[in-house]
Each structure stands twice: as structure tokens, then as C-alpha cells.
Image (cartoon, rainbow, N blue to C red):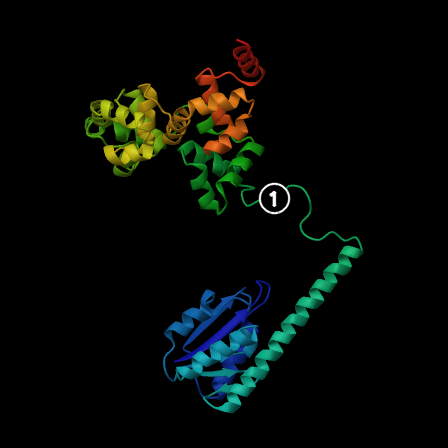
Amino acid sequence: MTYGYLRVSTDQQDENNQRMGVDEKASRMGLKIDEYIIDHGVSGTKEPEKRELGALMKKLKNNDLIIASELSRLGRSMYMVMRILEFCMKNGIKVITVKDNYELVDNIQSKVLAFAFSLAAEIERDMISRRTKEALARCKLNGIKLGRKPGKATKVKLTGHEEEIHEMLKQGLSKKEIGERFGVHRQTVRIFIKEKNIPDISRTGESESPLKRERLLKLDGQYEKIKKLREEGYTIKELTHLLDVSHTCLEKFLSENNISKNKKRTIELNSKYEMIKELRNEGQTFLEISKKTGFHKEVVRRFCIRNKISVTGHKKLRRKSKLKEQIETIKTLRRERKPYKEIGKLFGVTGEAVRFFCKDNDIEKGKRAYASLNTEAVQ
């Protein structure tokens, strides 16, 4: 097959000139272009895999032919062009260029020419880049401000669609859905609605949109099913996927209809109250308990808080037990007016931990400890 490859770097450039040259070359050779591969507005520095050229290379077969206007269309880097040409030579694919009048076949002359042309293309690109940078630097010195003008843009993609957006909000469409329709981010939609003072039903608390009412009616018809699923232990996340509704809509429906939360899970947790309490007293973490009980660590944590089960971490308990073993030593050190930080270093804990331990165990500190020591000595 014969392929025509065209590439233009910017949207302002036109590939028609390249197409005419390729067509003329093909007609002179008595060939017909079977398919055109066009990279529109794509830089030659981008890897072939990220261009249409990469897709073309995957489907090329032995004895296929590529016609391009020049070698620089394949790539702006010498190594990139060499890689492409090497791939073509290995797979028996011919490459012909119009302006360079170059024909790639598997011989030494083709390889030398390809190297020379690609090196020239790379030098040219570097020169263009250098001239552009010099021109920008000169503009800065002359006091010309580069880039977009400061301040907010007066016109955006949504400008002129105020009525349409208002109707979409009435229908109950979310800002994300509106953004997807206009090809902008949901945050852009939110700011536009605020700036143009478009009434937002979801925020003003007006009567519910037809779409929301439809979703709630859909749930009303499945009241018994939802109630049964909740009692069986289904989470809200699982139900949203099952019923194809939003998390907010489902939560509103559950609260309005007084459908109890996960009864099954609550009953199971209550039955394991003693076990959880014992494990917490041993200093086990919520994660460790969750693995043993089969519940999520956050569920275990909330259960412990609700039932006033100690939430002291295992590290704190271990630290307390370590200090408790050395209580007499700590008392002596405090009488010797040793600071908390130094005592902490001796036992591998922080000074703050020692301070709290001394406070909990009524260990005297500072001057009071020194005064009591002197009193004992006098007696």
C-alpha cells in the first residue's frame, strides 16, 4: 500500500500544500495514494508513538511505501528520524520525500543521506528556537508585556448560553454534566452561574427539579426492596451502584422514610462487644481488630467511641507499661531535679510522655521534689 504522511505544527498552518506535492510525486511515479495519515497541529519533537505516525508504523507491512513532503515532517530530532528510518529499513518499507528528493532503500547511500538531512533539520529547529527566545527577550527589554492580558476574561465558552444553562439547572442536571456538554470544567460552570446570577435550584432550596423528583419516585417504588437490602447489611455505596442513583438522593430517601441503618452490622458488632473491649485493653489497633472481626477499621473506631471503649493506642499503652516498670527510678531522678527530656531519653520516650506519666502518678517535680528530699534528710 502507498501512504501519504502529512504533518503541520500549528492549527494556523495548512496541509494542502504538502498534499499537492505528495500527489504530484505519486502521479510522476505512476502511483496512487491509498490513504493519507495526517498529524494536524502536532510538533515534530513529539515521539512517533504519541502521533498518528505511530499508528501508521504499527500497520505497515513489507513493500509498503510512505511519501512525505520532507524528512523533517517525520521528526525534528536527528535520532528520532534515524529510528523511524531504521524501523522502515528492517521491515522492508520504502520512504520517499518530495522536497529532498530522497528515496530510502536498504543501502549505505540512503543511510548517509538520511543522517545528513535529519541533522540539518535539527540544526534548523534549534536556530528557530534561539531566534524566538532572542525576540522575546528584546520585547521584555522594550517594556512589552508578554502573555495574556491581566484580569478575568470578558468572554468564555459559556457566554451567550445563560438561558440554556438555566434550563439545564431546572431539569436537575449537575454542574459536572453541564460542563461536559460545553467542554469546560465544573468549576468554570459554578463561577459563571455565580457571576451571571443564574438561579441555582440546588442551592436556593426551591421546589425540586423534575429529574430529582423522578429519581425519588423511582426509589419510592422500591421501598420494600431497599429496606430488605439495608437489613441484610448492604452499604449505601453498594445500593447506589445497584439502584443507579446518586449517594445524596439515596441518603435523602432513607432519612425521609426512616429506614434504619445497617441493622445486621450493628447486631454483629454488639455481639462482639466484649471481644473488642478486651482487644483494645491489650493495646491492639483498630486495623488489627478490623482484621479479626471482619469490619472496616473506621466502623470499629466509631463503635468504640459510641460504647466508651478505651481508644488509647497500643503505642501509648506500651509506653505507659515501660514507664510503670521504672516508676521508682523516675521518682529518684525527679528528686535529683532531672528534666523530663533527659528522663525520656533514658527510657526511649518523649519528655512530654514522662511529664504526663508523672502527673498521672503524682510524682513530685522540680523544687517541691528537692524540698521534700531535704526535709527527709533533716529528719
In the image, residue 112 above or below residue 196: below
Instruction: Measuring from the top left, give residue 261's x and y in whole percent.
Output: 27, 24
Identify the residue at image location x=69%, y=67%: 130
Nearer to us in this view, 46 or 35: 46
Nearer to us in this view, 32 or 54: 54
Identify the residue at image location x=48%, y=29%: 200
- Does residue 102 appear in this view? no
Nearer to us in this view, 11 or 352: 352
Furthest toward the top, the residue is 379
Identify the residue at image location x=49%, y=30%: 344
Residue, disc 1: 155
Q: Quadrant of residue 311?
A: top left
Left or right? Give the position of 47 relative to 146.
Answer: left
Q: Residues within 10 Å of mark 1 (few under 14, many from 20)?
A: few
Q: Quadrant of residue 34?
A: bottom left
Element marked by disc 1: loop
Left or right? Give the position of 212 relative to 31.
Answer: left
Furthest toward the right, the residue is 142
Instruction: Measuring from the top left, give residue 50's x and y in whole percent.
Output: 47, 65
